[in-house]
Every structure is written in structure tokens, then in C-alpha cells.
Image: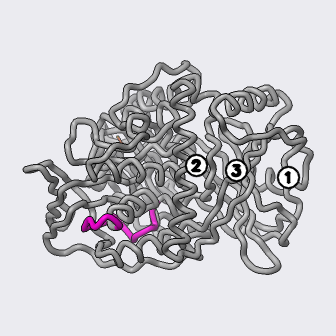
Amino acid sequence: MNVGDERSTSFWMESGPAIEASPLTSDAECDVVVVGSGIAGLSVAYELSRFGRRVIVIDRGRIGRGMTARTTAHLATELDDFYSELIRVRGEDEARLYHDSQVAAVNRIEAICRDEGIDADFARLDGYLFPAREADRADLEEEYQACRSIGVDVEGANKAPVPGIDTGPALRFPNQGRFHPTKYLAGLARAIVANGGELHADTVHVSDKEVDGGVEITTERGVVIRAGAAVFCTNSPTNDKVAIHSKQIPDRTYAIAGRVPKDSAPDALLWDTLEAYHYVRIQPLGDAENLLIVGGEDHRSGEENDMEERFARLEQWTRKRYPSFRSTDYRWSGQVMEPIDFMPFSGRNPGSSNIYVHTGDSGMGITNAVAGSLVILPLILGEDSRYAPLFDPGRKSAALPAATEFVRGQAGAVKNFTEYVRPGDVGSADELAPGEGAVIREGLSKVATYKAEDGTVTRRSAVCTHLGCLVHWNGFEKCWDCPCHGSQFAPGGQVLNGPAVKPLASAD
Ligand code: FES
């Protein structure tokens, strides 16, 4: 199981081809084992396979049905946290290099689509950043100056192309991109297999160790994969206990999608300036219609359970700005790992010789993942990567202002441990409606209690098996979310998303 088994189905999950792969049932050897089969894992595996490396990709669930299938797949080179912020934290030279990595990532996706004949609806288009409030215009001006200072291609526009409102002055970023992520993953998977690689679904990494210049990965079935190197490309790394998890926090984000008449909404990427910003794109559907996809309403994972209100606000926001939006046909959520200094962690795992990791994608999941593959490939080949120091997972954390999202997020992790002594969400399972879950206090214990539609009650320990934070019920996806480092568990306690590798313990 992975997050593809959560309740909602994204448009990408429904419209992209399934990638068939069987579990790994006997010991295996390869040059590189990749854990995780999203855009990061398959990009790394693809690049290595082109250089003749024998790769094995494993995933705890279906191939290509992790968080990548829960994005909205903007291929943006404008940084969602703003280059003005990145310059403040890392300086102009690193901000310039980071922007260069994002341009390289979009170019790489375009080249792979062309070279491998992948029809993933890739298109170049403009991106627009527009102010959510009058007061944000100064932020736009600051971002414009920051972009110009590091050579980002940007220009001022009188307004963004949002049909229902006058946005006021906006920034236009030419040459951004969009594509269909699960069609792209299917194309990568095909190419990896054609290059001699293997993909194994329902194959769960539970432990790893470095041995004799290589790595051994053990799976839940007790199968051992011996490889020269291992690359962990899960949303939140399953190989790491603390080093990287202290430098990123998990956020849930939400998306809705509905059909609109063609040409009623421009084919562009759009973002506003709220901290939990709205993001908009279209996906071509046919001659007469497009799909309008709108995301936003982010919050720290596990800290809110008001998803219906969030979806209602998203729909209201959309109708005002896109009057042709008729009805919401799809609703889904995903998890974004927010890194401390706005850039992902890609490279050699801290303290390891032959273990590599990619995580910390922020809201730039697709481009950061592909940029990560451009870092990890040369490192494994023994070559230099000019992006490697920038993305180094062991880099020192920059001092951040106390108001940043990251600092507030870390405070949330500390607060979580105070819940051990607080009452439960409800007094007993009798108070639960069918299909709902809640944490119940039983003496000194907290029990994650789920009542199925047929009334059957499942009880698991509410203590996350990663580092012991308490999980919270997610009523929309029908799963348990851990606010600390992003683990997610099925109602019955099975792991859907790391860093946890063990299910919630029995409460009986
Ligand atoms: Fe780390 Fe739950 S994910 S304690």
C-alpha cells in the first residue's frame, strides 16, 4: 500500500495508464536500487539505466501512484517561496544556481518526452504571479527586482489572465511548462525496463545497511537486494531517523478540478501571493473542453480536519475567478515536504557512502525531483555536479527569521508531545460515525480508533512508529497523519507513507 490507497482519486490517477509490476519475491543484485517510484525515483532510475547501470526500483505500493500522482504538475522555474526569500537566506549566487537547476529540469523533461516518444501533454506556457491583496503589490515588486538581479526571465504585466477579476499588476514568467505526470511516469517506466531495469510494486523497504562498498536493502518479505548504491526517493525518507527530518516539515495541500469550455480559461500557470497560495493550470481534455485545476488551502499535515470547508473555499475562490467553472469533478490532496531553506535535499545521505536521498520538494515537486536526478546521477557515476553543494542533504541550516513557516512547523512538533497528557478526541468508539476515526484516551495510552462503514471498530496505538509523535485522523483521505515528519497510515494501521516503516502497533 502507498498513498495511492488513500480515499481520493486525482485526475492523474484516473486518466494515466497503470504501470504493471510484480512484487520482488527473491533476493536480487543490481548496480543501484531505488526506493520510491514517483517522479524522483523513476527519473534517477531512468538516467542511470541510460548509462548502462542495472537498476531495481521498488515501491511500497503501486508504481507511480505515490505523491507524484497527487500533485498538479506545474513545471515552474519561478520559486514558490520567492527568489527574494531565497536570496535572503542563501545569497544571490546560490539563488541563481537554483533557478538554473529548475530551468534544466524543465528542459530535461521536454528532452525525455521527445527522445523517448512519451506523449505526456508537455507544453510550454507562461506563468503569472498575481497579488492576492492590494498590500501584496510591494512583495511583487520586490520579487521582480530579486528575479532581475539573478537573471530570471520575468516582465511586468498589467494583469494576469484570470477571466473573472482584474488581478492588478502581475509578473509574467515565460517558458514555464505543464504535463500529465502519470503519463510521463508510465513513459519513464517503459524506458527503464527497455534499458534492462526492473520495477517491483508492493515491495516495502524496512531496513538498509552499508556493506563492503555497497548497500543491502531488506524488504518486508525478508528479501534482500544487494546493490552498489541505494537511492531513497520517497516523499519523506524511510532510511533516515533524524538528520533530514529535522530540516523539513510536512504540509497537506488540496486540489479541485472541473471541466470548462475551451478558451474560457487561458493555458497558463497562475499563482497568487498568499502564504498558502492558490495555484492554477489547465489540462487539455478534447476539442471542446479543458480541465481547470486549482490548488491551495495548505496546512501542516495532521493539524486540521476541516477539509470540507477547505474544499468549499477553494471552489468559491475558483468560481469567482473562473465563471465558466461548472462543477467540481475531482478532489484530492497530497503532501508537500517544506525544507528549511526553500531548496530540496538531493545527494549523498548524511553519514553514508553509498546511500543517496532526494526529498524536501516544497511546492516545486516535479522540477525539484528532476533537478535532483541531475545531481544524483553524476554523483553515482563518480562525476561532479555543479548543483551538488546547493542540494547537499548534509548542508548546514541557514538561520531563518522566527516568522517563517518552517519555524512555526517545528514548534508544532514540540506541541505534539504535550498531547500525550491531554484527553482524547472523543470518549469512546460509540461516538464515532461509520467511516470515521478519532484518538481515544485509555489510561496512559492513546488509541487510534476507526469505525468502518459496517460498524467494525479497529484499534491501533496512536503512537507513530517513526519517532513517537501522536497521529491524527484525516477525515477526507480516511487515514492517520503524523504531523511531525509526514508518515501516513491506513485506518487499520498499515504504512501508506514514510518515514515510518512499521505499522501502528496493536492497541489490544
Ligand atoms: Fe516522525 Fe511520525 S513521522 S514521528
- Viewer-proximal residue, 220 or 199? 199
Element carrying mark 1: loop
- Viewer-proximal residue, 244 or 436? 244
**Label 1, label 2: how many angstroms apart (C-alpha)?**
23 Å
Mark number, residue 161: 1
Q: Quadrant of ligand 1?
A: top left
- Viewer-proximal residue, 207 or 57? 57
- Viewer-proximal residue, 101 or 223? 101
Disc 1 marks which amino acid? Pro
Question: Is residue 130 found inside the magenta-colored segment of the image?
Answer: no
Check disc 2 and report the residue beneath it. 103
Question: Is residue 58 found inside the magenta-colored segment of the image?
Answer: yes
Disc 3 marks which amino acid? Tyr
Q: Quadrant of residue 288?
A: bottom right
Q: Is residue 434 visible?
A: no
Question: Which label sits in the foreground, 1 or 2?
Answer: 2
Disc nearer the start of the sequence (1/2): 2
Residue drawn at 62 percent across, 69 percent down? 11
Locate residue 82, reporting x and y percent: 64, 34
Locate residue 136, reporting x and y percent: 79, 30
**Label 3, label 2: how many angstroms apart (C-alpha)?**
19 Å
Q: Is residue 268 left or right of residue 220?
A: right
Magenta-drawn segment: 50-66
Question: Which label sits in the foreground, 3 or 2?
Answer: 2
Q: Is residue 229 above or below residue 204?
A: above
Q: Quadrant of residue 233?
A: bottom left
Check disc 3 and report the residue beneath it. 279
